[in-house]
Image (tube, helix red, strand yellow):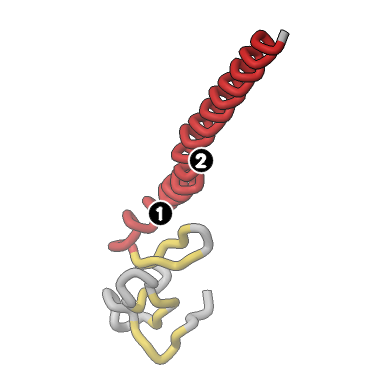
Amino acid sequence: MTPILPTRACRNHPARPGLGVCPSCSSVVCEECSIRVDGILHCRACQVSAVAAPDRPRWRSLSAVLPALVLLPVAWGAVTLLLQGLAGALALVGSWLREAG
């Protein structure tokens, strides 16, 4: 591969030109010292954290579902109160009709 950073040397191999910069630790790395994860160049030392990154969307998914989990009982309570109020109103109307009839 053609070096991206021809003026900077690899952190581990000073005689080799740098291929890129690790976004996690900002180290310049050559082809041997680098690994690509999802198309992004990382140094081998940061490889563990880069490979663990795909777990993050699970938390994003949970954070998207969490409001629904909180609002569902609130909505259920509102519907229950509405139905109780409707039942009370119907009972009141029924008592009025019995008194009038």
Residue 3 shown left or right of residue 42 in the figure: right
Q: How many marks?
A: 2
Q: Secondary structure at mark 1?
A: helix
Question: Which residue is the site of mark 1?
Answer: 53
Q: Nearer the viewer, residue 59 or 82?
A: 82
* Res 58 → quadrant: top left
Q: Secondary structure at mark 2?
A: helix
- Where's the C terminus, which quadrant? top right
The percent coordinates of residue 13 (x first, y second) are 29, 77
- The numbered mark at residue 68 is 2
User: Which mark sits nearer the N-terminus, 2 or 1?
Assistant: 1
* Res 98 → quadrant: top right
Decide: few, some or many residues near mark 1? Use Cα within 10 Å; few <14, some 14-19, many ≥20.
few
- Amino acid type at circle 1 is Ala
Q: Nearer the viewer, residue 100 or 34?
A: 100
Which residue is at a point 34% across and 84% down the rendered structure image? 9
The percent coordinates of residue 47 (x first, y second) are 35, 58
Task: State which mark lies toward you, 2 or 1.
Answer: 2
Q: Is residue 6 above or below residue 46?
A: below
